[in-house]
Image: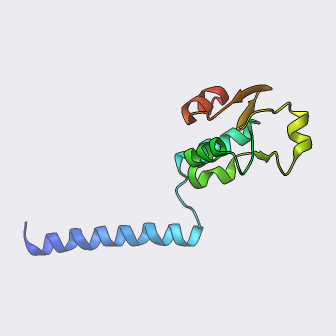
Amino acid sequence: MNKRVVSYIIITVIIIALIFFAITLFTGVDPISDNDQLARCLTQNGATMYGTEWCSHCKDQKELFGDSFQYVNYVDCDQDKTSCSNAGITDYPTWVINNEKYPGVQQLSKLKELTNC
């Protein structure tokens, strides 16, 4: 290949990258992570995690989601004792999915399976 063809290829790649960057910047569209999609799907399907801030296993569960945990329907039982009592929550964390309780840390793959996410 001569230098001119290589230059055209490089310029084309740069232009495509700039267009992609501009579209992302101006539309505010960010790629959604798999964990974001799962957390949102869990919430849409009515799944709820009950826990507390002091519970080490609750922290472990949250860490599996990372920043995506913000999209999970979460009830802090220290802050909302009534909801936790009404749901019959005695262990932390406990997931309630389709009116079934799943105590303990649940793997993301298990949560996907339980909710068809």
The picture places residue 18, in percent across and down from the top left corner, at 40, 72
- Seen as rendered, the residue at the extreme top is 100
* Res 73 → quadrant: top right
Q: In this view of the protein, which residue sits in the foreground, 18 or 112?
A: 112
Judged left or right of residue 96, residue 57 is left
Q: From the viewer's perspective, is residue 110 above or below residue 27?
A: above
The picture places residue 4, in percent across and down from the top left corner, at 13, 75
* Res 87 → quadrant: top right
The picture places residue 88, in percent across and down from the top left corner, at 86, 30
Judged left or right of residue 1, residue 74 is right
* Res 107 → quadrant: top right
- Number of marks present in the image shown: 0
Q: In this view of the protein, which residue sits in the foreground, 10 or 29?
A: 29
Q: In this view of the protein, which residue sits in the foreground, 6 or 67?
A: 67
The picture places residue 96, in percent across and down from the top left corner, at 76, 32
Judged left or right of residue 10, residue 46 is right
Which residue lies at the image location 66% right of the left edge and 32% below the top edge?
104
Q: From the viewer's perspective, is residue 61 above or below residue 86?
A: below
Which residue lies at the image location 68% right of the left edge and 50% below the top edge?
71
State the colouring used for the structure image: rainbow
Quarter holding the C terminus? top right
Q: In this view of the protein, which residue sits in the foreground, 77 or 108?
A: 77
Which residue lies at the image location 91% right of the left edge and 34% below the top edge?
86
Which residue lies at the image location 72% right of the left edge and 34% below the top edge?
95
